[in-house]
Amino acid sequence: MKIKPFKLERYFAKYEFSAEYLLSSSDCESLSIEDLLRLEENSEKSFKDHWLGYTESLGSPGLRQEISRIYESISSDQILVHAGAEEAIFTFMQAALDPGDHLIVHWPCYQSLFEIAASIGCKISNWEARVENNWELDVDELKGLIQPDTKAIVINTPHNPTGYLMSAETFQETWQIAQSKGIFLFSDEVYRESEHDPDIRLPAACDLGNFGVSLGVMSKSYGLAGLRIGWIATQNQDLYQKITHLKDYTTICNSAPSEFLAELALRHREKIVSRNLEIITSNLGLLDNFFAAHAETFSWIKPKAGPIAFPHLIGQDVDAFCDQLVNSQGVMLLPGTVYDHPGNHFRIGFGRKNMPEALSRLEDFVD
């Protein structure tokens, strides 16, 4: 398999551990192991006693049970745990697609959502979210993109990098199109449960039927990226078995300590998400004021979910702006060029406690 360099990850590798402030982070504020163990009585002893042998390839039964509680109709034997979302994307693409197949991808997007399929030899069509439409997707455009050999539609909602949340009507229409044509709807739901208004949360694709596949991870809404735990949820047993067989050639099984801590965290996920939403809401208010005060330099569409947005930089080159900012102020933003997006946008993250300090430095730089 020949695959192109991951532009976003290469950019992060350049600055992530040297910049003082990551104002582009896509995850929420993390927790320490001690923070997690404090959530349950006697958990510290249980953690210390936890066996460090091989774990079950599918994921520990307790963890799969906790993940299944996120969904309405999914059982633990319809969950397959992976080493983060990246491995789960990889195994799905390898299991579902063959050379020459056609894939439709909600774009701009996380590079893996199309690059792995391209490396297999698939044809890719972008279902484009456009800023002039407030990042809304056009279902009629989706209908026009479908070909006889379309195998999957890939969506990401809530969306990275824009913070867009698909409307219930668009989501249902997308599902009906996929289901009626026997096409997989692969739904990247890593920001699910971080909607700023919980009443507009969408159903999970895996709950809708046999062609729905949901991607989840501990990294984003829960802020526990260091656990490296993600999963696939699907009712499609043929696809599930194919992914299971592929995992034997990747990680085989997951980290035992990570599975223990992920299960513990998910038992208290509402508390963790509530804490992260408080940070997001507070920081979002600061951002709203900042962009209003600097309307001659930036424009933005206020996001509806998650800890990220995709503002537009006016009158300057976004790559040069981001480079000068990180080198002079120690504040990292992510230029939209890493998504191959031509609109002079950048990704800003507001899910961390130190965001106000980073925003102050950005304001000093702009002024």
Image (spheres, rainbow, N blue to C red):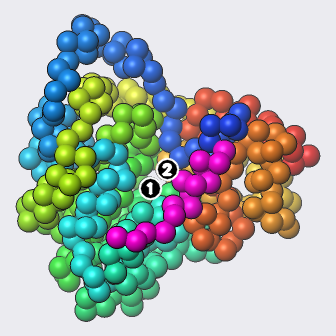
- Left or right? Give the position of 149 relative to 157: left
Q: Position of residue 366 (x, y in %)?
A: 87, 48
Secondary structure mostly seen in magenta is helix
Residue positioned 44% across, 43% down in the render: 220
Q: Position of residue 181 (x, y in %)?
A: 20, 83
Q: CA distance from mark 2 to mark 1?
A: 6 Å
Tell me if residue 299 is in the magenta stretch: no
- The correct choice, above or below, for 323 with respect to 184 in the image is above
Residue positioned 56% across, 38% down in the render: 351
Residue positioned 42% across, 34% down in the render: 226
Q: Position of residue 323 (x, y in %)?
A: 78, 53
Tell me if residue 5 is in the magenta stretch: yes
Residue 235 seen: no
**61 or 57: which is nearer to us?**
57
Residue 363 falls in image quadrant: top right
Q: Position of residue 83 (x, y in %)?
A: 30, 44
Which secondary structure lies at badge 1?
A: loop
Residue positioned 31% across, 91% down in the render: 147
- Left or right? Give the position of 236 relative to 9: left
Which residue is identified by label 2? 305
Which secondary structure lies at badge 2?
A: loop
Residue 152 seen: yes
- Left or right? Give the position of 228 relative to 340: left
Which residue is identified by label 1? 158
- Left or right? Give the position of 75 relative to 36: left
Label 2: how many Cα within 10 Å (few below 14, some 14–19, many 20+): many
Residue 103 falls in image quadrant: bottom left
Residue stretch rendered in magenta on the structure: 1-15
